[in-house]
Amino acid sequence: MEYKRKDVFTKPATPADILKLALEKEKSSYDFYSQQIKLTKNPSMKKLFIKLKAAEQLHIRYIRKMLER
C-alpha cells in the first residue's frame, strides 16, 4: 500500500483546513482498524483494534464539533 501525503498545502492553511485534514486522517485510521478487526485471527489483536477504532471514533466526533463552531 502506497501512502501519499495529503497534508501539503499549496496556500496558507486556515484552522478549518487543518481540522479537515485531521478529520480525513482520523477517518482513514478508523477504516484501517475496521478492516484489521475483520482480518485478524488473533483475539488479543482484535481487542486492540476494537479499542483503537473506538478512540478514532471519539476523535472524529471531537473534530466535527470543532468544525461546527
Image (cartoon, grey):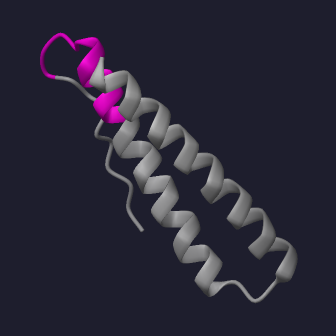
The residue lying at 73 percent from left, 58 percent from top is: 51
Q: Is residue 37 left or right of residue 42?
A: left
**Could you tell me how many numbered marks the image carries?**
0
37 to 6, vertically: above or below: below
Residue 5 x/y as whole percent: 33, 42
Residue 9 x/y as whole percent: 21, 23
Q: Is residue 41 magenta?
A: no
Question: Magenta segment, which residues?
Answer: 10-21
The residue lying at 42 percent from left, 55 percent from top is: 28
18 to 26, vertically: above or below: above
50 to 69, vertically: above or below: below
Residue 56 x/y as whole percent: 56, 48
Point out the image quarter for the C terminus: top left
Which residue extends farthest right? 44
Point out the image quarter for the N terminus: bottom left
Q: Is residue 24 left or right of residue 53?
A: left
Residue 55 x/y as whole percent: 64, 47
Q: Image quarter for residue 16?
A: top left
The residue lying at 32 percent from left, 50 percent from top is: 4
Q: Is residue 68 left or right of residue 59?
A: left
User: Of 59 and 13, which appears nearest the observer?
Assistant: 59
User: Of 10 and 66, which appears nearest the observer?
Assistant: 66
Which residue extends farthest bottom? 41
The residue lying at 60 percent from left, 75 percent from top is: 36
57 to 37, vertically: above or below: above
